[in-house]
Image (cartoon, rainbow, N blue to C red):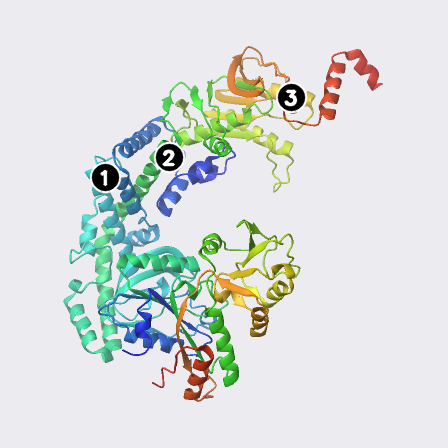
Amino acid sequence: MQLKNVIDSPCGLRYMLDQLDLQSGFARRWLLDSSMMTDAEYIRESYGVLRCFTDFIEREDKTYIDTLQFRLQGLKDIRTTINNLSQKSILDDIELFEVKHLAILATDVNRLLQEHGMEGVVSIPALDEVISILDPDGMKIASFYIYDSYCAQLKDLRAAMRQHPDQQDDLMLQASELEEGVRRDLSQQLHPFATAIEQAQIALARIDVNLAKALQMRQMGLTFPEVSEDGTCRYQDMFHPQVKAALAVHGRDFQPVNIGFGLLPTLITGANMGGKTVVLKTLTLCQLLFQFGFGIPAAQARIAVKEEIYFCIGDEQSVEKGLSSFAAEMKNIDAVIKASRENKKILALIDEPARTTNPTEGAALVSALLKVLAGRDMSLVMTTHYDIEPGDARCLRVKGFENGSMDYQLVEVQDGEVPHEALNIAQSLGIDSEWIDMARKQLNAAAMPPMVKKDKH
Amino acid sequence: MLPFINDILRYDSLSIVGLEKNTGKTETLKYVLDRLPVHTKRIAVTSIGIDGETTDQVTRTQKPEIVLREGMYFGTSETHYRQRRLVSEVIDVSDVTTSLGRVVTARAVTGGKILLSGPSSGSGLKHWMSEMQRYDIDLVVIDGALSRMSLASPAVSQSMILATGAAYSVNMNTLVSKTAHVVDLINLELTDDENIAMLMPIESGVWFIDKDRQLHGLDAISSLSKDFHFQGMDCCETLYVSGALVDGFLEKVRMNKNLKQTELVVRDFTKIFVSPQQFRLFIKGGGRIRVLQKSKLIAVTVNPTSPSGYVLDSDTLCNRLSEAIGLPVYDLLKN
């Protein structure tokens, strides 16, 4: 799975990419095309490289980092040219310029990094030979044409052109044949370097991406995660950067959350507006950020590698597919159940399943889902408003509405009993009292079953 | 030095604009490029997009080639770069693509011929011009067609030369009055700096600024829509039309009593598509039109010969036009 396939996940991954200060369009494309890492060793290595960059931005001053970023702006997507080169095509002047430009850029960036203790962090193949092929006069300037020094005859023809502008067309024709011969020679000489040039282009993209990730970590206060080997995950002071930024606009703070879960299902209950959905969103976001090697929005994080990540948020309607919200949700959860049978390492985050149907059947569906998935080797975090028997599931509860304000912390509880705070919360929102009072009366009446029955008849 | 070359060198950028095909724009460009002091000044040349002359793309007739001199910088599309007939050094390839490929920036190592087709949008052109500062360019010359098809406006340049002629009209009176109308539009004054800062980033829609300097967007998609209404605009100080300004809209503004004191702002003169009559009525009624960007009109050149072969008297044309617009007018072919 590539980053571009999950970038629009409702967990808010796009925000993280939008906030990434990438210098080149090529680096962005390369990042979007990168695959999700599912190998713990690979993830560790990737964070090892990122750590070199965070150390680097801490110790170097801003002007130097600005210089590096400015240089990286010169990174262009020349994959077509590289492809032509490896196909043994004859490159034209524009393509030869692109190769030279990239080779000089790679050499410059490599030197800049080496001078500042970043030798070998991201290895850039040496392209000195490429430069000397395309820079016969040793000018070290990233411009290109078929220089006079490639061919003595060409030099004479050009001198003649300047002296006899009236014969220019004729001389130009002769010169262009010679030029084409030079291009053929140059392309042949460059052909063995096609792979190295391609690697250099990718190395520069990796540097751009890592530098941007490192700057993002500092700016948003993200952390390096520990890779968990036992399948459990634990976050301390986890936050959602986008929600945090949105709250900050209104002068409000995001209350960080502590949460941990393992291979047994975790059930989160809690009042409305208790931030349950945000918890699931953040967990999904963290898992994806982890497997694409970004900093994690928490004070501390220990995360297990998963092969598949499912985020089922209840209220998405697939209008294009002609599905109702209920059907869309059922299909999404169905995919989780099917995948769980395939013995894959899965993380499933399900927000209030079956919320849109009647409470009797809804509760039955949720309870059964919990039983079905509990036996599987997977991590499941689910929120619900239904009172259900938790079985083996761990139950977490949002602390909830206390003294007129919401406490978003999660506390472990022994049973899955759901809080009954909806009316209090609605009242605090200033919802019309005629409605809320009526609901309260109904509830009180319901506490006396015979009366209800009598009313119904 | 020949007329107006010195004037040109007082500015960083010049666009050469033809009012119609065969008004001698290419001759004017050639005249200017031949006479610029290439040994003491760094000159860069480009064109707006595919020159707006889309017929080139449709009929596949070649655009005239421009002769560049050794040392001149130029920007053209990849397609036209490959067809060049001069020796030149590639110094940059832009990320932005036009219909003819990316824009290649190069320096002429020998003199020779090139087809010009530069950035195709206003922001692309501006970006290209600012990039040229890296090479210490003293003057950017833009081959700037005046066309409704072109998205890039020649008004991004500091100065301008206008080419007109019998191809625009073979009737001298009509030619003089039509040209004078365009000159009036080119000479429209800039709005104040505060308005420019506020309105320049807006690319679409109709907007107004109230007396408390608050910016409001109007719900109409463009000033072209028939049922355009001015509602809730009693305290409108400045009315900004980001797209085309047309007769119908201008008339509605003129007839609206609430907008008597309002300053009407357009991006630049190329966005104004109103008839001379409607324009005069508006100005006479005390209306004010201002622009966000304008160029200093340096001179007007004429080609007295129409494509059909009809020839106007060059001296009479130059004198009458010069009188009408208060600027020097040259027939470059004659001189």
Q: Earlier in the sequence, mark 2 or mark 3?
A: 2
Looking at the image, which is closer to me, B144 or A134? B144
Q: Earlier in the sequence, mark 2 or mark 1?
A: 1
A230 left or right, relative to A384: left
Identify the chain of the residue marked 1, using the numbered disc in the image.
Answer: A
| Mark 2 and mark 3 on one chain | yes
Identify the chain of the residue marked 2, using the numbered disc in the image.
Answer: A
Looking at the image, which is closer to me, A292 or B179? B179
Q: Which residue is mark 1?
A: A113
Contact check, label 2 and label 1, Cβ < 8 Å: no
Q: Which mark is on residue A422?
A: 3
| Mark 2 and mark 1 on one chain | yes
Looking at the rendered image, the disc whose residue lies closer to the viewer, 2 or 1, is: 2
Looking at the image, which is closer to me, B4 or A16? B4
| Mark 3 and mark 1 on one chain | yes
CA gap between label 2 and label 3 equals 38 Å
Q: How many marks?
A: 3
Numbered disc 1: secondary structure: helix
Q: Earlier in the sequence, mark 3 or mark 1?
A: 1
CA gap between label 2 and label 1 equals 20 Å
Task: Name the residue at 62% across, 21% down.
Answer: A385
Task: Name the residue at 42% across, 31% down.
Answer: A289
Q: Which residue is mark 2?
A: A216
Decide: few, some or many residues near mark 3? Use Cα within 10 Å; few <14, some 14-19, many ≥20. Answer: some
CA gap between label 3 and label 1 equals 57 Å
Numbered disc 2: secondary structure: helix
Q: Please, is residue B256 above or below residue B5 in the view?
A: above
Identify the chain of the residue marked 3, using the numbered disc in the image.
Answer: A
